[in-house]
Image: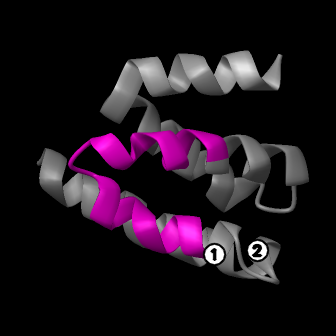
Amino acid sequence: MRWLAAEGLIAIGEEAMKPLLRALIEHADSLLLREGAHHVFYDMHRIDLHEILKPVMSELEGSEPSVEVPLAAEKALTELQQISS
């Protein structure tokens, strides 16, 4: 089920990034969320947001993701919001 949800977010594309980043900021302690987000961001490398998402991916793969992921997600979300406005 999680895999299908991730595939749905990938199909949505850029519009799915902001809610997913917000979820990581608020619930970074969820291993299942981090794994699903990693899947989505990994497949999003084909879009222009790759450079913005790269630090989040790096933290998702790090040793203390529940500590560092919210910070990286917050920075990426801020960058996305600046692009959108």
Residue placed at 76% from the left, 80% from the top? Answer: 67
**Can you say which quadrant of the picture contains the N terminus?**
top right
Residue denoted by label 1:
59
Residue 65 tag number:
2
Q: Is residue 44 left or right of residue 56?
A: left
Residue 36, x across and y down, in percent:
72, 40
Residue 81, x across and y down, in percent:
26, 53
Residue placed at 28% from the left, 52% from the top? Answer: 49
Residue placed at 57% from the left, 74% from the top? Answer: 58
Residue placed at 76% from the left, 74% from the top? Answer: 65
Residue 71, x across and y down, in percent:
57, 77
Residue 32, x across and y down, in percent:
86, 44
Magenta segment boundaries in residue numbering: 39-58
State the CA–CA distance, disc 2 to disc 1: 6 Å
Please determine whether, in this image, residue 59 is positioned above or below residue 17.
below
Please determine whether, in this image, residue 50 is positioned above or below residue 75.
above
Q: Is residue 40 left or right of residue 17?
A: right
- The picture quadrant where one finds residue 57 is bottom right
Secondary structure under tag 2 reads: helix
Residue 30 among magenta residues: no
For the residues labelled 2 and 1, say whether their Cβ atoms are less than 8 Å apart: yes
- Crowding around mark 2 (Cα neighbors within 10 Å: few <14, some 14 to 19, many 20+) is many
Q: Amino acid at mark 1?
A: Glu
Q: Nearer the viewer, residue 27 or 31?
A: 31
